[in-house]
Amino acid sequence: MSESTGDLVRRLTELRSEHRDLDVAIERLSRDTETDELGLRRLKKRKLRLKDMIAYIENKLIPDLDA
């Protein structure tokens, strides 16, 4: 089942928003000396997964030039 372009754009917007939110949270937590390092690492891994998902969707939205 193929997702429509509108669905992909909507999902991309959601992922970018979550990525920005995580960026802010990571920055805030990294300034705190009492921060849980494991939790911080998990947030950073989540942020990297989001980045990969964003790149995947962006690539799906690029038209296939061979077609």
Image: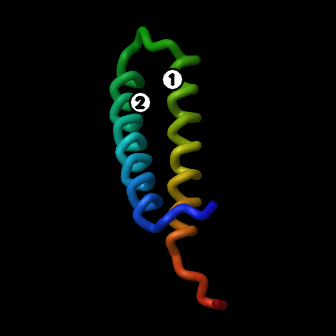
Q: Which amino acid lies under the numbered mark 2 shown in the image of this protein?
A: Ile
Residue at the spot 52% in from the left edge and 76% down from the top edge:
62
- Point 60% across, 64% down: residue: 2
| Image coords of residue 6 (percent x, y) | 40, 64
Placement of the C terminus among the 4 image quadrants: bottom right
Residue tagged 1: 40
Name the spot of residue 44 as percent of width and height, x first: 53, 33
Does 66 sit left or right of 14 as displayed?
right
> Mark 1: which secondary structure?
helix
> Do the residues bearing badges 1 and 2 touch, measured as CB atoms within 8 Å?
yes
Q: Measuring from the top left, give residue 24's x and y in whole percent.
A: 33, 34
Give how far across and how far down residue 37 sits, in percent: 54, 17
For the N terminus, which image quadrant? bottom right
Which residue appears farthest toward the top when viewing the image? 34
| Mark found first going from the N terminus, 1 or 2 | 2
Q: Mark 2 points at which residue?
A: 26
When asked about the image quadrant of residue 41, the answer is top right
Rendered residue at 56%/43% (across/down): 48
Extreme front residue here? Answer: 1
Comparing 5 with 45, the one in front is 5
Nearer to us in this view, 44 or 1? 1
